[in-house]
């Protein structure tokens, strides 16, 4: 069966090279005579896999030595509670910016453990922009300041980071990790679920500054304490072994592409092809404020619901799949993560042009 261009928001497309490598090693990894899935997480062979994955991620993201890299489970969503449980520990309050459903869920969860101050929100315009932040509204005594770097559902991203002074900045980068350069030193904590840019669902990466470890609320379950995982090099219990191995293959692949800056350059090119067309089209329209456009998720609409449906159906027949927008937004959304080749975006835009000519 021919592979399609899969524009799914997540789980999403993975590099074919990586899938094929995993396939080759599936039944027997190296000379071990067993699959990575069948290995003890405490074996020498597995230790080498997880150590290399961490070293490669550190290299790719230029993660300084005073940050721990953790491979956890529970998806991005578990971080919504882990973060307050571990960090809302001095003044029991935190600042949040509400830029969409994922921020909202994070806010809801944090509100169960302390006081949440919503500094700004873009809910008034269906989250189609990143709100301007007024520093005078930042709470100097907040335990942390929380943002969602790339808003998967609405297609917005931060292009500048808030200046939070001594208050640790916490970032959800589930849908943008390794897609563009990020200065880790600006953050106290960054996290990302794997299923958008890193590999199969099941691994969540947390990058945390060491001084933030060890002050979890008393009732925090052991499995939700960052310091437990940090002390045990992510091997407190059985980690998602196969997912970590697979993410390691993706890290290797990103290195072969030239690293994160090279990835960013390709992603900017890909996004430009699509946005340029949306800007000149008389039929299609992008839904996001230009200056806040995501490089990863591109939502767009046609003038009527019937045309949206027709477009999605005909695109699918062309091997351009999963273009339906999120149920809360409607229309279309093309997710063009690292693994989406330039040709996939070109094929999509060619089809959009044809569709426009026929349906004007
Ligand atoms: C997908 C996503 C999540 C949730 O991830 P799960 O692994 O499904 O819990 C959180 N934040 C962002 C920005 C996402 O894109």
Image (cartoon, grey):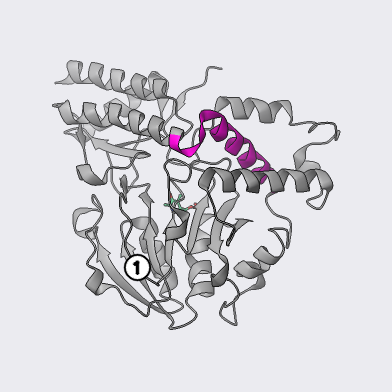
For the point 43% across and 52% down, which residue is it? 183
Q: Quadrant of residue 125?
A: bottom left
Q: Quadrant of residue 59?
A: top right
Q: Nearer the viewer, residue 248 or 195?
A: 248
Q: Nearer the viewer, residue 110 or 303?
A: 110
Judged left or right of residue 297, residue 218 is right
Which quadrant holds the C terminus?
Answer: top left
Label 1's element?
Answer: loop
Judged left or right of residue 331, residue 222 is right
Q: Inspect this view and state whether residue 179 appears.
A: yes
Q: Is residue 34 magenta?
A: no
Which quadrant holds the N terminus?
Answer: top right
Above or below, comparing residue 349 to residue 239 in the picture: above
Numbered label tally: 1
Q: Inspect this view and state whether residue 201 appears.
A: no
Q: Please state the extent of the stretch shown in magenta in the rendering.
A: 241-261
Residue annotated with mark 1: 164
Q: Residues within 10 Å of mark 1 (few under 14, many from 20)?
A: some
Q: Is residue 254 magenta?
A: yes
Q: Position of residue 223 (x, y in %)?
A: 65, 67
For the point 44% across and 51% down, which residue is it? 173
Above or below, comparing residue 317 to residue 193 in the picture: above
Please name the predominant secondary structure of the magenta segment in the image. helix
Q: Position of residue 9 (x, y in %)?
A: 42, 40
Q: Position of residue 129 (x, y in %)?
A: 23, 51
For the point 45% across and 34% down, which residue is it? 263
Q: Position of residue 25 (x, y in %)?
A: 74, 30
Q: Nearer the viewer, residue 309 or 346?
A: 346
């Amino acid at each position: 069966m021919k592979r399609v261009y899969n524009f799914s928001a997540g789980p999403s497309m993975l590099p074919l090279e990586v899938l094929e490598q995993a396939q080759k090693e599936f039944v027997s990894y190296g000379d071990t005579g067993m699959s990575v899935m069948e290995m003890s997480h405490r074996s020498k062979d597995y230790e080498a896999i997880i150590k290399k994955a961490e070293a490669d991620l550190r290299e790719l993201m230029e993660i300084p030595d005073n940050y721990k890299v953790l491979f956890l489970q529970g998806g991005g969503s578990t971080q919504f509670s882990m973060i307050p449980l571990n960090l809302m520990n001095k003044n029991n309050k935190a600042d949040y910016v509400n830029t969409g459903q994922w921020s909202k869920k994070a806010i809801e969860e944090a509100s169960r453990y302390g006081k949440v101050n919503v500094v700004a929100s873009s809910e008034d315009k269906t989250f189609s922009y990143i709100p301007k932040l007024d520093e005078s509204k930042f709470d100097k005594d907040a335990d942390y300041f929380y943002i969602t770097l790339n808003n998967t559902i609405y297609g917005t991203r931060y292009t500048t980071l808030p200046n939070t002074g001594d208050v640790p900045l916490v970032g959800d980068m589930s849908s943008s990790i390794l897609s563009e350069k990020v200065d880790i030193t600006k953050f106290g904590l960054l996290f990302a679920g794997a299923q958008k840019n890193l590999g199969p669902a099941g691994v969540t990466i947390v990058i945390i500054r060491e001084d933030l470890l060890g002050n979890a609320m008393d009732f925090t379950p052991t499995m939700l304490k960052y310091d437990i995982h940090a002390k045990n090099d992510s091997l407190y219990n059985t980690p998602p072994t196969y997912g970590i191995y697979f993410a390691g293959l993706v890290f290797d692949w990103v290195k072969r592409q030239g690293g994160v800056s090279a990835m960013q350059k390709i992603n900017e090119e890909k996004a430009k092809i699509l946005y340029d067309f949306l800007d000149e089209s008389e039929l299609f329209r992008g839904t996001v404020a230009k200056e806040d456009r995501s490089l990863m998720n591109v939502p767009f609409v046609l003038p009527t619901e019937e045309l949206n449906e027709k477009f999605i159906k005909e695109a699918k027949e062309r091997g351009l799949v999963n273009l339906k927008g999120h149920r809360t937004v409607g229309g279309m959304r093309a997710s063009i993560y690292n693994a989406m080749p330039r040709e996939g975006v070109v094929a999509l835009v060619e089809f959009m042009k044809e569709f426009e000519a026929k349906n004007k």
